[in-house]
């Protein structure tokens, strides 16, 4: 079974657990499904799964990775950045993204959390706003296709 054909498992409750280098193949598959234009190269995924000062969490259901979040800790700046965040499309709208965000925020232990999001990604922006994030800036033509990024921030604590 691969990330493109994950079943909906109504009886199985998703779990949020730490991720490791062993999750490289699953994260790579999820990247391609969730971000066809912006999927990270496999070596970037390897790096965030082994480097220090990185929060690595995954959501699993029935033994399969169905989502993940990567937090880049920058203690000198008092901020953590959500470097990457994905939930398989078949599992969206079930609170999994919100649970991943909450666990990442708790693990960060820093005063602020920031992220970037495509300005056209209305569903993600709604999720971030519900979780207390607010727009604080933008990056022009940040994403492939020359789409701008909205920078969002949440004060934690």
Image (cartoon, rainbow, N blue to C red):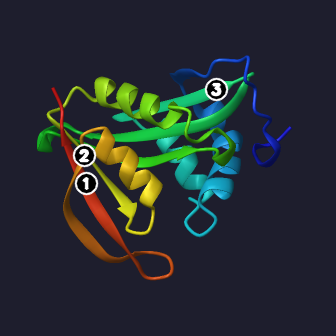
Query: Rounded to the nearest whole Å, what is the CA distance between mark 1 and mark 2?
Result: 6 Å
Residue bearing the label numbered 3: 60
Relative vertical location of residue 34 with respect to residue 127 in this rendering, above or below:
below
Quadrant of res 93: top right
Determine whether label 1 and label 3 are within 8 Å by CB.
no
Q: Is label 2 in a helix, a strand or a loop?
A: loop
- Residue shown at 71% from the left, 49% from the top: 29
Q: Which of 55 and 145 is in front in this view?
A: 145
Q: Is label 3 or label 2 in front?
A: 2
153 left or right, relative to 34: left
Instruction: Give the SS element for disc 3.
Output: strand
- Locate residue 41, reporting x and y percent: 60, 60
Q: Which of 82 and 100 is in front in this view?
A: 100
Question: Is tag 3's residue or tag 2's residue first in the polypeptide sequence?
Answer: 3
Q: Quadrant of the C terminus?
A: top left
> For residue 124, which numbered disc appears in the image?
none
Q: Are marks 1 and 2 in contact (CB under 8 Å)?
A: yes
At a point 65% along the width and 36% down the height, the residue shown is 66
Which residue is at the front of the view, 9 or 155?
Answer: 9
Tell me the crowding category of disc 3: few under 14, some 14 to 19, or many 20 or more residues within 10 angstroms, Cα based: some
Marks 3 and 2 in Cβ contact (< 8 Å): no
The residue indicated by pointer 1 is 152
The quadrant in which residue 99 appears is top left
Q: The N terminus lies in which quarter of the figure?
A: top right
Q: In which quarter of the image is residue 54?
A: top left
Q: Where is residue 51 in the image (x, y as percent from the top left)?
A: 43, 38
Identity of the residue drawn at 39% across and 45% down:
127
Comes first in the chain, label 1 or label 3: 3
Instruction: Check disc 2 and report the residue beneath it.
Output: 133
Please indicate whether residue 96 sits to the left or right of residue 124 in the image: right
Which is more N-terminal, label 2 or label 1? 2
């Amino acid at each position: 079974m691969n990330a493109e054909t994950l079943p909906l498992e109504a009886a199985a409750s998703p779990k949020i657990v730490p991720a490791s280098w062993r999750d490289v193949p699953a994260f790579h598959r999820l990247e391609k499904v969730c971000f066809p234009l912006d999927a990270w190269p496999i070596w970037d995924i390897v790096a965030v799964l082994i480097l220090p000062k990185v929060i690595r969490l995954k959501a699993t259901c029935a033994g399969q990775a169905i989502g993940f979040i990567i937090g880049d800790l920058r203690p000198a700046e008092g901020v953590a950045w959500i470097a990457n965040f994905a939930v398989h499309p078949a599992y969206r709208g079930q609170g999994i993204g919100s649970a991943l965000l909450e666990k990442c925020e708790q693990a960060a232990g820093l005063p602020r959390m920031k992220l970037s999001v495509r300005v056209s990604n209305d569903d993600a922006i709604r999720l971030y706003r519900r979780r207390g994030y607010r727009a604080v800036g933008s990056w022009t033509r940040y994403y492939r296709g020359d789409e701008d990024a909205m920078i969002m921030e949440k004060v934690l604590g």
